[in-house]
Image (cartoon, grey):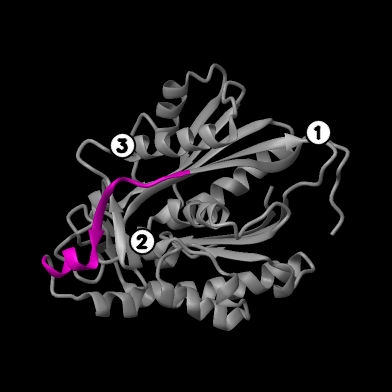
Amino acid sequence: MAVQTTLTNNPRITAIGSFVPEGKLTNGDLEKMVETNDEWIVQRTGIRERRIAGEGEYSSHMAFGAIDNLIERYKVNLADVDMILVATHTPDFVFPSVACQIQARYGIGQTGAMDLNATCAGFAYALHVANGLVASGLHRKVLVVGVDNLSRETDYTDRTTCILFGDGAGAVLVEGKSGVPSAFIGSRLGTDGTGGIHVYRIGLSDTMNGEPLKGGGKLVQNGREVYKFAVTTVSQGVQALLEQCGMTVQDIDWFIPHSANLRIIESICERTGIPMEKTLYSLEYFGNTSAASIPLALDLGIREGKVKAGDTLLLYGFGGGLTHCGLIVQWG
């Protein structure tokens, strides 16, 4: 695939940072709360621990932590960021947005700021939008954050969902560069709004399509239906995205899907032919962190020396809506 290299607005991912709260919720802790046990949880999800935000710690604070980590590691200046995109479905407030809180915290003088909600596909969606904004020349430097505070919407009396979710944040910079190819090789997005009833949290309405909703403001999920959607849709999406880009599984250095459940990831890998040893996930000690799970997994791979400059990554988010988004990008 030919990629222009003469423009000054070829988008590149130039920095990354991540943050998880100090609080932990282990499988052993959950054994004392609901009828479950460590062996059952690990066998069905691959999760051993989750990080949980403390009292007074919300999505904005975790976003700040990820951004501070990015600044410390890459010695970057955010003063010239001209768009802030935050992927989250758990903002501190309905409004102002987390993005506006970030603008205020870092004193960024002239920037757009907005939250984007595609739930667990949110980070991939936000990267897709950032790519478009930079590639079009509308913006030069976009700060992208994926953050969710799922512990505050989790029903800890529901043994089917409370074993899954944790809190965390990841942040990246997407900048226009000259003389180098775009890092963004291809993308594929999709939606099945008819499946919205399978994972939701009540807002202003307590009915959907005339059907009464449950949960009382807590997250409700039909795990069986979400599993079917994820395994089928993501497997098909991965194959279609590779074909679209004229690539094969062998061209991908690292597959980084949303860390929903290890069994989902294993099934996707089996169907697509992607080896598990080339797959990165963040769920074992962080749980399902929704929009934060992909940047957390990517950053773990970087810190562990697995992901290196020039590596080709296949990111794939999927979640409530039902939404999904796949991207093939080059790191570094």
**Mark 2 or mark 1: whose residue is earlier in sequence:** 1
Give the left or right position of residue 16, taking residue 38 as reference.
Answer: right
- Where residue 141 appears, as percent x and y from the top left, is 64, 31
Magenta stretch: includes residue 186: no
Say above or below: 57 vs 225.
Answer: above
Whether residues under marks 2 and 3 lie with C-beta atoms below 8 angstroms apart, the answer is: no
Occupied quadrant, residue 157: bottom left
Camera-side mark, 2 or 3: 2
Segment tinted magenta in the rendering: 18-32
Q: What residue do we see at 30% from left, 58% from top?
A: 50
Location of mark 2 (residue): 285
Report, in whole angstroms, how far the alpha carbon at label 2 lies from the one at label 3.
24 Å
- Where residue 177 appears, as percent x and y from the top left, is 76, 36
User: Which of 158/266 is in front?
Assistant: 266
In the image, what residue type sits under mark 1? Thr
- Where residue 201 appears, as percent x and y from the top left, is 28, 55
In the image, what residue type sits under mark 3? Asp
Location of mark 1 (residue): 8
Residue 323 seen in this snapshot: no
Magenta stretch: includes residue 24: yes
Report, in whole angstroms, how far the alpha carbon at label 2 lies from the one at label 1.
40 Å
Q: Residues within 10 Å of mark 1 (few under 14, many from 20)?
A: some
Q: Residues within 10 Å of mark 3 (few under 14, many from 20)?
A: some
**Mark 2 or mark 3: whose residue is earlier in sequence:** 3
Label 3 residue SS: loop
Residue 92's mark? 3
Label 2 residue SS: helix
Camera-side mark, 2 or 1: 2
